[in-house]
Each structure stands twice: as C-alpha cells, then as structure tokens.
Image (spheres, rainbow, N blue to C red):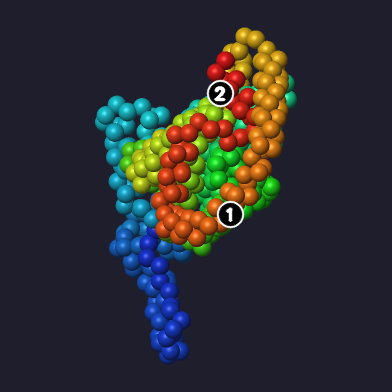
Amino acid sequence: MSALPGMKEGISGSILSGTNIGIIKNISEDRKEAALEVLKYFTSKEYQKEKFKERVLSTSIDEILNDEEVCKKNGLCELAKSIQYTVEPEFIKEKSEDYRKRYQKYIYQYLHEDKTIEETLKKINDITAIYYMTLDTENSYIGLVYFIFIFVLSLLMLLSLTFIVRESFRPFIMFLTDDFWVITVLGSILILWTPVIGYGPVMALKCHMKLLLISIGYTLSICPAMYKLIIQFPEKSKLIEWIYKHKYLFLLFNILMDILINSISLISVCTSQTVLVEDGESFEKCKYNGEYSFILLIIYKCMVIVLILLLIFVEWNNSSSWYDVRFITVALYIDILSIILIYTFHVIQIKNYISFFMIPAANTTIISFSNYICLYGFRVIIGLMRKRDITLDFISRIEESFITTQSQLKSFNDSSKNNKKNSIYKSELMDHNENNINFETASTKRTSFIARMINYHYSNQEYNSSSTSSASNTFNK
C-alpha cells in the first residue's frame, strides 16, 4: 500500500474519518466518572498500540508510530507518518455514500471509457457544486445576455416617454395624464428587472423581494388604466368621486395591499432547497414553509384583473376610449396566460438550472413587454406611422365640438322657456305617482342594475370629456 501522490513530492493527504465518542451531560456524576474511565482506556497508548498493530484503527501518537515492534508487524508506520490528515467536509458527510459511488464511477469512466480529463473533472466538481445564474460567463452566457437584453429594452422604454412632451403626440396620450403614463412604463420596467434578483446564491431576502417587486411592478403598470376605467364609469357614486379626486391615494392603497399580502410570507420561514441533479448541474431554489402568500398573491391579482374586465365590459363601446379598452383587454388576457404558466412551472420539477431561471424570466418579460405595448407603446407606434401632423386636426375637432355644444345650449334655453308653463302641472303629476314608482323601483333594483350594465355595454355613448373623445377618434384617421 502506498500514499496517493500529491502536488509536491513527499506530500499526500487523506480524509480523516471514524466514530466520535463523547459523554452525555444528563446522567449522574457516578456514571460520568465511569464513562470517563472508558474514554481514558480507548485513548490510552496501550489500547491504541494493540489496535494499530491489528490494523483496526489509525493513531496519531508518535511513540507508537516510531515503535519498531509495532511497525514491523503493522508495516504502515511510514505511510501513516507521511500523510497529512484532513477532516471530511460537511457537504460530503451529508451524502458520503453517493459521493463516493459517483466519484468512483467518473474515475472509471475516464480510465476505461475514453472520457477526457476535462469532462471527468467537471463531473467530479458537479457532485458538490451548486450552480446559479450570474453575469460571469464561465459556466453560461445566458445570465449576461439576458442582463444586456433587459437593459436595452428598459432603456428604449424610458426613451419612449419623451414622446409625452411632444405636442404632435398629445392626441394619442389623452387617455391618461402624463404622470400616470410615467408610472405605467416604470411598472413594466420594474417587472422586467425582477428576475435579476435571482442572480447569485439563493437567499431568503431575495426570495421575498422577488415576489414583492413583481407584485408592485404589476400594480404600477395596470393601476393607472384601472383608475381611468373607474372614473369614466357611466354611473357616478361617492366612491368614484373620491377616487377621481385622490388618484395618488388610490395608487398608494393598491401598493399597500401588495405589501400587506407579501408580508404574510415573512410569517413562514423561507429557506433554500437544493435540487440534486444526477450526472448534471445541481442548483438551489426558494422553499417556503407554506405557499400561502404565493397563492394569496395570485388570487388577489386575479381579482384585480376580473374587476378591470368587468369595467371593460361595461365601457366596451364607449366612444371616448374605444381603442383603449381593447388594447387593455389584450394585455389582460396575456397576463392571465402568463400567470397560469408561472404557477404551472412553479409546481413542475425542473432539473436544469438554466431552464429553471429562464422560464419564469421569459414569463415576466412577456408580462412586462405586453403591458408596455398594449397600454402605451402602441400609441407611440401609431403616432410615428402617421404621415401628417394631427395637431391641426385635433384643434379642429375641439372647435367643432365647442360650436356644437353652443348650438345645443341655445336650443335648450329656447325650449326651457316654452316648457316652463307646463312644469308646474308635470310636477304635481309626478308627486301623485311617486309612491307607485318607488315601490316598483325597490322590487326591480337588482334586475335593473344588470340591465343597465348590459345597456352600457352595447351603447356607444361618450362617457368622457370631448377632448378625450377627439383624441380617441384620431386612431380612426
């Protein structure tokens, strides 16, 4: 038997392994004394000398290793003295049997199956290595390529906001105010950057931050459109009036809801779970002791989407936002499909760390880009495709609307003079029938509400200001 060759001549190493012996503290003093005597016996020179001669154990007592009688019988003294012992690493202790079998397997493949030394060393390293996405290109270019892609895409999104200040594009962006367009685009960018948090080793803080940022990003992206649909709802109420006057509080409320739901995840401990891949590259993923926050977050976002779809149904033929509601609908349907895919791949076992990163990253990219295009980007595209300046056309429509309004106001004043004499008689007649009308209204309130919503859906009545209507109609040009 000889020592394994080391990097330098005369130096060799070996993993020190064996059985640990100790004394438990929850026993009587007499039993502790008795156990101590046993330990003294096992560690005594006489005991170790006999067992080393029989090759039952190794020893570090120099006197035994230099004993000629022992060395003559054992024959391993020189070998034992030439080895530098090291403690077995913890990551090998946890799967020592599997490690030894795979190590032996790869060495034999190199010796007998014409495997290259590079392949063999990588497979040996993969037994204990944990892979993760990074900007480093040593293992994969995917991390760097994805980072550059979203950086360029984010930059283009930000640059597209400059069209807000151009007067020639004003009719295309009347659906929302300038500040809400900025918030919408920033929300899409925030969603786009969420996967980057997964770069590097898995940490509990990263796991919580990914859910929080994608949730807030989606709220910032879709909430301004939801606000617009609410305030132009055909029937007004105190709640709608409050939302109209406090748009930033409305936005803040939705963000606080995201924070509240995500804070539930802090109750359950989040740890990293190692996904072992035999003959492959192992990696780690987030593991929550309970999926309550993740499921609750999906339910909440689905409720928001359903609310927006109901508003879209009511305002489907609203002439002031005819194109807007259709593009919002496309964005929502893409979001629904992406959410389904995210949850599906969340429960499916993926055994490749690149696929484990790229599939969710692709889904979030689709959500981000589709929201950007359907809510804001298509307006820039249409504006760039227009061959003539629409500013004069927009002003002309405003003037026509003003003239029409003045004409209607004059007709109304003339009509009111003629009908003034009949108002007293009509008022008495209405008071006489008021009780009967109230009774019928109370019994049909629920049915009439549904009927009104359906009527609003098929009606092409304008529920918004004339300026917004004119802006919407520019898409027809």
Image quadrant where residue 135 sits: top right
Ranked by sequence position, the earlier of labels 1 and 2 is: 2
**With respect to residue 361, does 93 lie above or below?**
below
As helix, strand or loop, the secondary structure at mark 1 comes to: helix
Most distant residue in the top direction: 387
Q: Residues within 10 Å of mark 1 (few under 14, many from 20)?
A: few
The residue under label 2 is 378
Residue 38 relative to residue 424: left or right: left
The residue under label 1 is 428
Q: Residues within 10 Å of mark 2 (few under 14, many from 20)?
A: some
As helix, strand or loop, the secondary structure at mark 2 comes to: helix
Q: Are marks 1 and 2 in contact (CB under 8 Å)?
A: no
Query: Residue at image x 58%, y 54%?
Result: 428
Q: Would you say residue 172 is visible in this rendering?
A: yes
Q: Tell me the distance, in whole angstroms, between the alpha carbons under discs 1 and 2.
A: 56 Å
Please give the label number shown on residue 286. Answer: none
Between 423 and 224, the one lying in front of the other is 423
How many labels, in total?
2
**Residue type at numbered disc 1:** Glu
Residue 359 relative to residue 266: left or right: left
**Percent x, y of residue 113:** 27, 29
Quadrant containing the C terminus in the rendered view: top right
**Percent x, y of residue 453:** 46, 43
**Percent x, y of residue 241:** 64, 49
Query: Residue at image x 44%, y 34%?
Result: 458
Query: Residue at image x 58%, y 22%?
Result: 473
Query: Residue at image x 62%, y 15%?
Result: 384
